[in-house]
Amino acid sequence: MTASPEPGSLPRARQGAEPQRLLTTLLGDYWFWRQEHIPSAALVRLLEEFGITEVSARAALRRLTSRGLLTSSRNGRTTAYGLPPRANDVIVAHMRRLLTFGAVTPSWDGEWTVVMFSVPEEQRETRRALRDGLRLLHFGMIFDAVWVSPHDRTDDVVELARRVGVRGVAVFRARKVADDDLEPVLDRAFDLDTLRERYERFIDTHRPVAERLATAAPSPGEALRLRTAIMTDWRVFPTLDPGLPAELLPDGWPRDEARRLCVRIYDSLGKPAERRFREILAAFDPELARLAAHHTFAQVSALESPATRRHTSFDETTDRDRLDVLDRSTGSRRHGG
């Protein structure tokens, strides 16, 4: 039976790719670094907490497995799912990036990384791969084949060009902008107005939750739903936000407020949310339930960054997810020339 929403709790999403995002958020929050597989029935029951039907939940499990984000195993008639082997370094890197994002606003050395390229028309797929890679590196497009970033991304672009097989790429660092007028560059390359609206919507959605939690402790079930909701919403920002230096941000930039709100809700609800996760899992496997654990922003931020590693198929799948987020936000078409 699907749980009923509690008064004042956030509405539960039911459609599209939402079950996949919810499930990956839940596993990242309470099954971080675990290799053990969880019975599919337990994962279906977890998603029931968010109003997801069994049909949608099982479809999400199959889809995540086909994309390589989960692996499956069988023990008799029981199917179970877990994180792929050897994906730990990638997962640690992604979690650390997610929970450290916005903690510090970088300063600017006044230089831009400028990328110019020429890819023949018959190599449209290669050109698209290069453009997608630049988007994931948070470059902004000035013209079709001229992209800029206020960060030193020279080595990243060289590696990207090598990986997608493009030789006609020029990367250089530049300081001077004509008439010292940065506004046309920022307006053309980075859609800060839309991003500001996204942050403000996040704040408007979750601030009432923080105010309510200051006066009333939630049940474990509500804690799980609220904590998962805010992390599911927060996880898009490291993809959408180019992380511009302080000198280039407009006054009253709302990222700091949004991050403080996320940390406050996410960290304060960790223990009761973990309790509910354990309760649900214990109904199917009490031994597994004891392995569940939550973490805080500070704990993940303190993890050591994984050493330099090769780009894996797991990275490629998560890169496609990030590109989908960018496309949904901007309405752009990745498949264009």
Image (cartoon, rainbow, N blue to C red):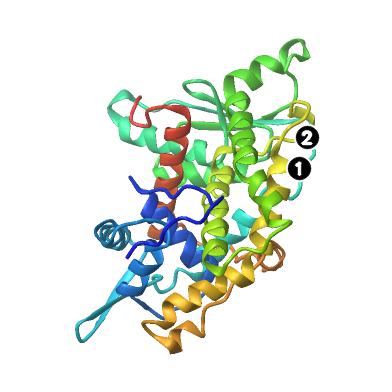
Which residue position is annotated with label 1? 105
Residue 49 visible in this rendered orientation of the protein: yes
Determine the residue located farthest toward the top in the rendered image.
Answer: 179
Q: Quadrant of the image for the C terminus?
A: top left
Image quarter of residue 253: top right
Say which amino acid is labelled 2: Ala
Image quarter of residue 60: bottom left
Where residue 166 sits: x, y (%)?
Answer: 42, 37
Tag 2 secondary structure? helix
Say which amino acid is labelled 1: Thr
How many residues crowd around disc 2 within 10 Å: few (fewer than 14), some, or many (20 or more)? some
Where residue 173 sits: x, y (%)?
Answer: 68, 31
Where residue 286 sits: x, y (%)?
Answer: 43, 87
Left or right side of 1 for 29 = right
Instruction: State the CA–CA distance, disc 2 to disc 1.
Output: 6 Å
What label does residue 246 carry, if any?
A: 2
From this view, report whether residue 296 is shown above or below residue 256: below
